Image (tube, helix red, strand yellow):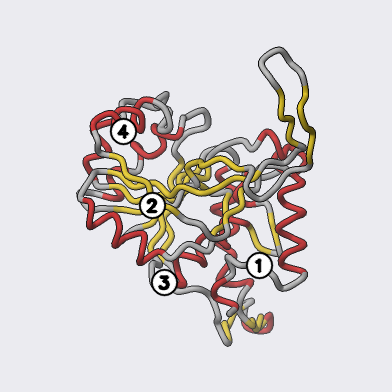
Amino acid sequence: MKVVILAGGFGTRISEESHLKPKPMIEIGGKPILWHIMKTYSYYGYNEFIICAGYKQHVIKEWFADYYLHTSDVTFDFANGGEMTIHNNVAEPWKVTIVDTGYDTMTGGRIKRIQPYVGKATFMLTYGDAVCDINIPKLLEFHEKHGKIATITAVNVGQRFGVLEMSEDGTVGNFREKKEADSSVVNGGFMVMNPKVFDYLENDQTVFEKKPLETLAKEGNLKAYRHDGFWQCMDTQRDRQKLEQMIAERNAPWMLWEK
């Protein structure tokens, strides 16, 4: 089964780095967050990827073009015309298709553009800026059992700020620090789609999270797989620093391949 990753956006809220590269190529632990996401799928044996590129898509292509070289020992024999010999290759067993899905294309439009590469098969889909310790086989089992068109993964997102408890007239009854229980459930990506989903995508301006998912929900064709484990989106520099710290402390739950 193929894995489609949305990696074409601008990343405006982490613009300190995204003005140089697409957000999925911003590094944590010395590797792009895109690499971390792919390693999660690869851990479970899913090694064929379709990357929906757009903004600065050449950065993604060049990184993968050099990946084989950068992860191997190399001998350059300049006496013989610069002949290059690769030793001890430790690159991933990946097949990666990078598709330029347009500069200003919306999420639904990007998915629509990679339809020829997916064909009529069920595929997995996620965003290129969030890591998770999700059990992929259990997600797929859930999708296959309910038989609907689309499955999203529901995750809890904690509050970042202090909590106000107040009455309708504005009287503050209590002000307290956030708690783990102060959270909301959102679509965390790590989705599974039947090919019928392409019928819900109109053109480049289609925002996947609006009309397509809203229509699927109204029809009863959208299910949510509840993930209560670790999930973290890298939306800001604060998020990136949090992920970097977790890696440095060897407490990165999504890095299943390290365990």
- Decide: few, some or many residues near mark 2? Use Cα within 10 Å; few <14, some 14-19, many ≥20: some
Assign the N terminus to one quadrant of the image. Answer: bottom left
Residue type pointed to by label 3: Tyr
Give the labeled residue for mark 3. 44
In the picture as drawn, the residue positioned furthest to the bottom comes out as: 88
Q: Secondary structure at mark 1?
A: loop
Front tag of 1 and 3: 1
Q: Position of residue 145 (x, y in %)?
A: 22, 57
In front: 240, or 145?
145
Marks 1 & 3, CB-CB < 8 Å contact: no
Q: Position of residue 173 (x, y in %)?
A: 76, 27
- Decide: few, some or many residues near mark 4? Use Cα within 10 Å; few <14, some 14-19, many ≥20: few
Residue at position x 60%, y 43% in the image: 183
Residue type pointed to by label 2: Tyr
Q: Which mark is residue 225?
A: 2
Task: Say whether disc 3 or disc 4 marks the residue closer to the N-terminus.
Answer: 3
Q: Which mark is residue 252?
A: 1
Q: Secondary structure at mark 4?
A: helix
Residue type pointed to by label 4: Ala
- Decide: few, some or many residues near mark 3? Use Cα within 10 Å; few <14, some 14-19, many ≥20: few
Front tag of 4 and 1: 4
For residue 90, above or below residue 9: below
Task: Say whether disc 4 or disc 1 marks the residue closer to the N-terminus.
Answer: 4
Give the labeled residue for mark 4. 217
Residue at position x 39%, y 46% in the image: 152
Q: Position of residue 210 (x, y in %)?
A: 41, 27
Task: Say whether disc 2 or disc 4 marks the residue closer to the N-terminus.
Answer: 4
